[in-house]
Image: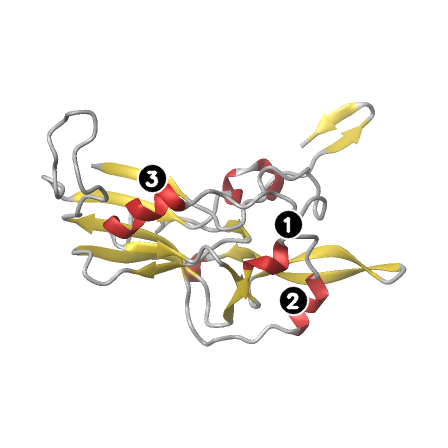
Amino acid sequence: GRALVFVDPKPESTAPTGPMQGMGSSAPPDLVGIEKLLAAWGVKLSDNYVVGDRAAAIRVNVSSGTRPVIGDYVAWMQMRPGNFESTDGVTGALKQLNFGTAGALDKVDGAGTVVTPLIATGLESMRIDAAKFATLPDVLGLFRDFKPQNKREILAARLSGTAKSAFSAAIGGKEYVPQSKEPIQVIVVADTDLLTDRFWVESNTVLGRQVL
């Protein structure tokens, strides 16, 4: 059928709010179940890697020794119109999306579906070991060690066509359906943090009132 699915190799949505608080502190997600579905639909999530884009890096305040500095955080990316598929009705009118420690989607051979990229990084992108985000990340070190791979990474894709079942047998006595009876229409996005306020909203207190 139709589905809009958000998956994430390193979700930050459970971390405290603030530009740098709690980055890398959330527990790793359980992706075993969804990985079976993704493979049947035709894609795989880079669950051990986070995607960075040097050209799209969001600037953040970080500490360097005893003084605060501003650094480009390559794992937080601001996607612009050049990153969106302009001919698709879902992404054609988008102007900006902020991604945080997002993953990449790889096509799975032999799935039988059509994988159409909807959102992709620029060529100054790189896959970074997710283990580097297990604790507070080294923003300046990540930028310093960044080596662009001259490749666009898929952050969101449309999956269409006939999909094979992710299961080998019927569940609960129902009829087993080995493949979809009608073409599926699924959109998979490799980030959940873009759905949270902390990537879009600044909260301040003015004269005792909260201003967003």
Looking at the picture, which amino acid does disc 3 mark?
Leu
Q: Earlier in the sequence, mark 1 or mark 3?
A: 3
Front in this rendered view, residue 60 or 109: 109
Q: Which residue: 12% across, 35% down?
A: 176
Looking at the picture, which amino acid does disc 1 mark?
Gly
Foreground: disc 3 or disc 2 = 2
Q: Earlier in the sequence, mark 3 or mark 2?
A: 3
Q: Which residue: 24% across, 49% down?
A: 40
Residue 61, located in which quarter of the rendered image?
A: bottom right
Instruction: Using the image, tell me which numbered label, if any, was put on residue 142.
Output: 2
Instruction: Using the image, tell me which numbered label, if any, was put on residue 24.
Output: 1
What is the spatial separation of the Cα atoms under label 3 and label 2, in whole angstroms? 31 Å
Secondary structure found at label 3: strand
Q: Earlier in the sequence, mark 2 or mark 1?
A: 1
Contact flag, marks 3 and 2 (Cβ < 8 Å): no
- For residue 86, above or below residue 148: above
Q: Residue furthest right?
A: 66
Horizontally, residue 136 falls left or right of residue 184, namely: right
